[in-house]
Amino acid sequence: MISIVYVGVILVIALMILVGISIYLRKEILLPDKKEELELGNGQYIGTREKQDDSFGSYQKDYGLFAVVADGIGGYLNGDVASKITVNTFLREFKKNNLTGNVNYFFQSAAQKANFEIRKKFEDTPCGTTVVSVVISKKQMYWFSVGDSNIAVYRKNRLIPVNRKENVENWLEEQFLSGKINREEAMNHPQKRRLMNYVGFDGFEGGQVCEQPITLQSGDKVLLYSDGVETLNQIELETILAQKGTANDMAERVIDAIKVKNVKSKDNATVVVIKVK
């Protein structure tokens, strides 16, 4: 009788241990990025423009956080619509797909679908948008970029650029470094800020993706922002990001600093801040 009770107790204990292990593994495998480990904030400002061409969005799944910023090309009539189509497409594709596999495939596929939708809607009418996007899971950051919007990581008092702008200015720099043009030709080109690539472009083939994810550290701040935020220089941005506060506090401070800066013209400005705890 004693032995039967003893065996029963052992079995109950063993079952409890197995249940505990199962719960632990479930948390570790299915919930690697708890919401409290990544804090999200955002801010937006129309500047001196007549309309807001920037769009942004974010979404949290059990395994990670997704964020995207798109800057519609202001020189085209429907830049605001193009940026909304792109953000909505990226959000839709993220929500319906499990990205524990190839994240870069998701980025490129979503961009191609957004490009198709823009071209279908506007046909031969010029229309397009830049886009920057990240997926963060287990403190691994995957990123995607088209055009001249920005992804950067603030770490140890420095704002470190992640992507490279796809514009004529950077192309000219590459041409100069390779010896194909001289310095004067590179410096005096009349269309240095013109985009070389954007979503909605008839010849769009894809964007930049990370070859390897970036390992984030506690205390890092990830920024996605349109070029209107460049009303502030790097030192001004670093000064804001060095202050204490929530991710939303930082995003709002960036926008407030742009509003009060004394410059003649201000582009649409959008910033998403992700704080790593």
Image: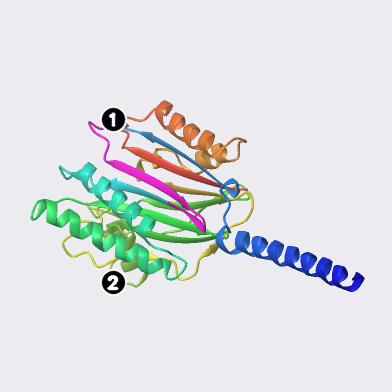
Q: Position of residue 11 (x, y in %)?
A: 78, 69
Can you tell which of label 1 and label 2 is closer to the viewer? 1
Residue 233 picture location, percent across and down: 46, 41
Which stretch is magenta?
A: 47-66
User: Is 59 part of what is drawn in magenta?
Assistant: yes
* Mark positioned earlier in the residue sequence (1 or 2): 1
Q: Is residue 263 within the magenta segment?
A: no
Disc 1 residue crowd, few under 14, some 14–19, many 20+, Cα 10 Å? few
Q: Looking at this rendering, what residue extends furthest in the right direction?
A: 2
Helix, strand or loop status at disc 2: loop
Counting the numbered discs, the total is: 2
Residue at (9%, 51%) from the top-left corner? 125
In terms of image quadrants, where is residue 1?
Answer: bottom right
Query: What residue is at 35 percent from the left and 72 percent from the top?
Result: 178
Q: Is residue 191 left or right of residue 212?
A: left
Residue 180's disc is 2
Left or right of residue 70: residue 201? left
Image check: 43 left or right of 49? right
The answer to which quarter of the image holds residue 8 is bottom right
State how far apart marks 1 and 2 are (Cα): 38 Å
Residue 145 vertical position relative to residue 272 in the rendered view, above or below: below
Q: Which of 59/224 is in front? A: 59
**Residue 229, percent from left and from top:** 40, 40
Q: Is residue 98 above or below residue 261?
A: below
Q: Is residue 242 visible?
A: yes
Mark number, residue 48:
1
